[in-house]
Image (cartoon, rainbow, N blue to C red):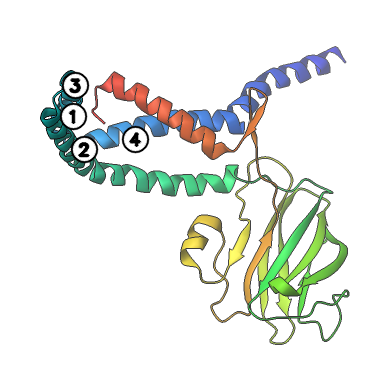
């Protein structure tokens, strides 16, 4: 008994640091530091550091002239003109390097949001599966009705907790479902008229699984940012299949925060720190 208790304590002591290191907060902090460093280094390598330094020094000189000669209108107006030209030159020098930084960071954030943006559905908690149709349809309360236009087939671990609801104004059919066991499952959505069958992935449980809240037809840019699943067929009468996953909130000093805001703040702070340490002009 004593040996078993000691083994449990030892396992807990080993697992606790691992849990902390793999928590969403720890992941966001580590990611922010790495991205902050990469942003600064990438900006430094893709920009003309000497020209940026000169442009910033000239702007400071013109701003100082405005303060020193504020009683001399011609000098002040000339300084304002030079400030505008200097600002335009500075923006020109930083535009291309910022593109090199922003584009990969944006794509990275989109991918990470698949894991940190939404939380999986808790076992035995109700959730909604919504099918948005391109044309009006009627939903029946029984999935086996022959004249029902849209039906769903569920795995054994997921059950329907209420009859489907047809929201005619939105051309949507909504099912309330419940998952009893952790795992990833496929819900099959069928169009009775043409026999078309489409699938939507459902994540039940906890942890940090890759989550796709919606599966879309067409809408390339929307799919790029919102969906992690293959597109629906172009000629499909179904425009989208979505699930109302709960938003994931990261606790920071007792306040819940979306991971993107925390990542943005921390990566900017890390970037400014590394900028000073590496002596890179931004």
Q: Is disc 2 placed on a helix, strand or loop?
A: helix
Residue 41: quarter of image = top left
Depth check: give the residue in front, 155 or 123.
123
What residue is shown at x 36% (from left), y 44% (from top)? 102
Label 1 with label 4: CB-CB less than 8 Å: no
Whichever of callouts 1 and 2 sits on the residue coming sooner in the sequence is 1
Q: CA distance from mark 4 to mark 2?
A: 22 Å
Determine whether 264 is above or below 72 in the image. below
Task: Check residue 59 in the rendering and tell me which mark sits there, or answer none.
Answer: 1
Whichever of callouts 4 and 2 sits on the residue coming sooner in the sequence is 4
Residue 44: quarter of image = top left
Label 3 with label 2: CB-CB less than 8 Å: no
Left or right of residue 153, residue 133 in this image: left
Q: CA distance from mark 1 to mark 4?
A: 24 Å
- Find residue 21 and report its horizontal and vertical position in percent: 58, 27
Q: Circle 2 is placed at which residue position?
A: 87
Q: Circle 3 is placed at which residue position?
A: 64
Depth check: give the residue in front, 68 or 133.
68
Determine whether 154 is above or below 183 in the image. below
Q: Circle 4 is placed at which residue position?
A: 39
Q: Is disc 4 placed on a helix, strand or loop?
A: helix
Label 1 with label 2: CB-CB less than 8 Å: yes
Q: CA distance from mark 4 to mark 3?
A: 30 Å
């Amino acid at each position: 008994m004593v040996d078993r208790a000691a083994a449990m304590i030892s396992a807990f002591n080993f697992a606790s640091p691992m849990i902390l290191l793999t928590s969403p907060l720890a992941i966001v902090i580590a990611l922010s530091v790495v991205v902050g460093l990469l942003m600064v280094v990438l900006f430094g390598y893709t920009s003309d550091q000497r020209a940026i330094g000169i442009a910033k020094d000239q702007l400071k000189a013109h701003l100082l002239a405005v303060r020193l000669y504020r009683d001399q209108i011609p000098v002040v107006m000339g300084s304002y003109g030079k400030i505008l030209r200097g600002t335009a030159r500075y923006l020109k020098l930083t535009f291309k390097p910022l593109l090199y930084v922003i584009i990969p960071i944006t794509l990275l954030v989109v991918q990470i949001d698949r894991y940190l943006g939404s939380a999986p559905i808790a076992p035995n908690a109700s959730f909604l599966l919504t099918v948005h149709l391109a044309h009006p349809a009627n939903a029946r309360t029984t999935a086996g009705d022959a004249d029902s236009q849209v039906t769903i087939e569920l795995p054994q671990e997921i059950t329907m907790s209420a009859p489907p609801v047809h929201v005619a104004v939105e051309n949507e059919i909504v099912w309330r479902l419940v998952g009893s066991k952790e795992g990833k499952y496929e819900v099959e959505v069928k169009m009775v008229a043409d026999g078309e069958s489409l699938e939507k992935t459902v994540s039940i449980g906890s942890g940090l699984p890759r989550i796709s809240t919606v599966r879309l037809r067409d809408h390339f840019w929307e799919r790029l940012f919102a969906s992690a699943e293959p597109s629906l067929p172009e000629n499909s009468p179904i425009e989208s299949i979505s699930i109302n996953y709960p938003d994931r909130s990261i606790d920071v000093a007792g306040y819940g925060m979306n991971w993107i805001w925390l990542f943005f703040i921390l990566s900017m702070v890390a970037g400014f720190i590394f900028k000073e340490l590496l002596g890179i002009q931004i």
